[in-house]
Image (cartoon, grey):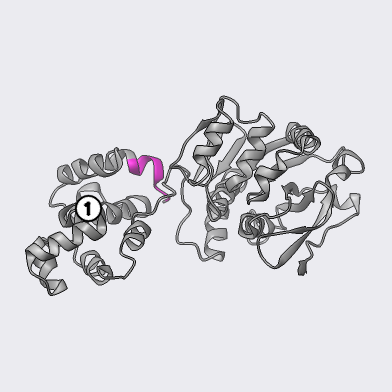
């Protein structure tokens, strides 16, 4: 088993700086990316290019020492007891419970949950990544609050903790000083949003550029990707080239006959085969792809809604508005107000 050292410092004087302390809570069988994704964001975040690192990172487990992950790597960690001993007066800016199969097991350790709750009371902000949400719920931090976790775990979270208002769709949720996030890479999105809140939009964008992420996503966006769903349904890649052709020709009128011809099939056979494979009609698929493209432009550009409607092949903004209501239950203007990043 390979061990990954977290470069932990036992020098309490190192904690007495202007850096904000971020404490990651880990346990055996964490998902490694649940930890290292947001850890990377916090480690290298700066107010501007000339500033020192804004955060000081600590990785903590119940007993300390090496903690198993769901990979061949182990993570070195400080014992939780230190934060009730030599670090008892150290302020905690952000406390993060990491996810993985070990989280539902960790909640059965009542002394651990009690200590986590005490740390949470000392923290300005408490967060979870993926199934780390179960730790927050077990500590009573999510009672009567909105929360999210990986979509596979939402049903179990709601059943085990009925006082939690579990939502399935968002990639992360902020409810007061409590933040919860969906599966794995959503922890990076949540961390970037925290950077934006602490250090400003420019710092978050620069961090996103450094990580080569395409955008700083708002929490209300769905953890379900329409593109990924299309790929999952079309496991043999039969209609992948068609979808790429549609995206490249959105400004054109695209008929079923056009799509059938592109696939080298009769219109009748194409419609039947496509509907069986993709569980939607060709026409609805085209509309969904148009909406996806329009959402990207609404988030990332300052073009007018009318212009975006034309670019995405809706002919006019009213047709786009109706398509948005059908597909994502909101209007283009409402979507832009909530998610525009420029």
| Horizontal side, residue 54 vs residue 209: left or right | right
Q: Main secondary structure of the magenta part?
A: helix
| Horizontal side, residue 63 vs residue 290: left or right | right
Q: Secondary structure at mark 1?
A: loop
Figure quadrant of residue 253? bottom left
> Residue at 79% across / 49% down in the picture?
61
> Residue at 76% across / 49% down in the picture?
19
User: Which x, y percent locates residue 37?
Assistant: 61, 58
Query: Magenta stretch: residue 336 in it?
Result: yes
User: Which x, y percent locates residue 236?
Assistant: 31, 70
| Residue 271 makes an appearance in the image | yes
| Horizontal side, residue 59 vs residue 131: left or right | right
| Residue 311 makes an appearance in the image | no
Number of marks present in the image shown? 1
User: Which x, y percent locates residue 1?
Assistant: 76, 69
Dot 1: within a 10 Å radius of its alpha carbon, few (fewer than 14), some, or many (20 or more) residues?
Answer: few
Q: Nearer the viewer, residue 181 or 42?
A: 181
Above-or-below relation of 103 to 137: below
Figure quadrant of residue 49? bottom right
> Residue at 16% across / 52% down in the picture?
314
Q: Nearer the viewer, residue 159 or 130?
A: 159
User: Which x, y percent locates residue 42?
Assistant: 66, 54
Q: Which residues are magenta?
A: 335-341
Q: Which residue is mark 1?
A: 280
> Residue at 13% across / 75% down in the picture?
264
Query: Magenta stretch: residue 142 in it?
Result: no
């Amino acid at each position: 088993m390979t061990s990954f050292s977290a470069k932990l410092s036992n020098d309490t004087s190192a904690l007495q700086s202007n850096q904000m302390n971020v404490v990651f809570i880990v346990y055996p069988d964490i998902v490694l990316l649940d930890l290292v994704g947001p850890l990377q964001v916090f480690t290298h975040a700066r107010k501007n290019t000339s500033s020192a690192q804004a955060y000081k990172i600590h990785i903590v487990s119940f007993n300390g020492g090496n903690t198993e992950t769901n990979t061949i790597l182990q993570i070195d960690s400080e014992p939780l007891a230190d934060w009730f001993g030599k670090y008892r007066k150290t302020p905690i800016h952000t406390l993060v419970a990491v996810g993985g199969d070990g989280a539902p097991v960790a909640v059965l350790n009542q002394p651990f949950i009690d200590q986590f709750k005490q740390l949470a009371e000392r923290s300005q902000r408490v967060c979870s990544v993926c199934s780390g949400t179960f730790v927050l719920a077990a500590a009573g931090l999510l009672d009567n609050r909105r929360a999210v976790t990986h979509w596979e775990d939402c049903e179990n979270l709601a059943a085990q903790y009925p006082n939690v208002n579990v939502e399935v769709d968002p990639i992360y949720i902020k409810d007061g000083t409590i933040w919860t996030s969906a599966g794995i890479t959503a922890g990076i999105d949540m961390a970037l949003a925290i950077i934006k809140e602490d250090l400003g939009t420019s710092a978050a964008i620069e961090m996103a550029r450094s990580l080569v992420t395409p955008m700083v996503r708002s929490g209300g966006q769905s953890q379900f990707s329409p593109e990924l769903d299309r790929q999952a349904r079309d496991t043999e890649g039969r209609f992948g080239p068609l979808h790429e052709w549609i995206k490249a020709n959105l400004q054109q009128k695209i008929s079923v006959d056009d799509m059938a011809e592109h696939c080298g099939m009769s219109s009748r056979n194409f419609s039947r085969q496509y509907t069986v494979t993709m569980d939607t009609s060709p026409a609805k698929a085209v509309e969904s792809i148009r909406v996806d493209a329009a959402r990207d432009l609404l988030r990332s550009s300052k073009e007018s809604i009318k212009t975006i409607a034309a670019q995405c092949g809706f002919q006019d903004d009213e047709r786009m508005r109706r398509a948005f209501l059908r597909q994502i239950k909101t209007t283009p203007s409402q979507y832009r107000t909530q998610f525009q990043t420029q």
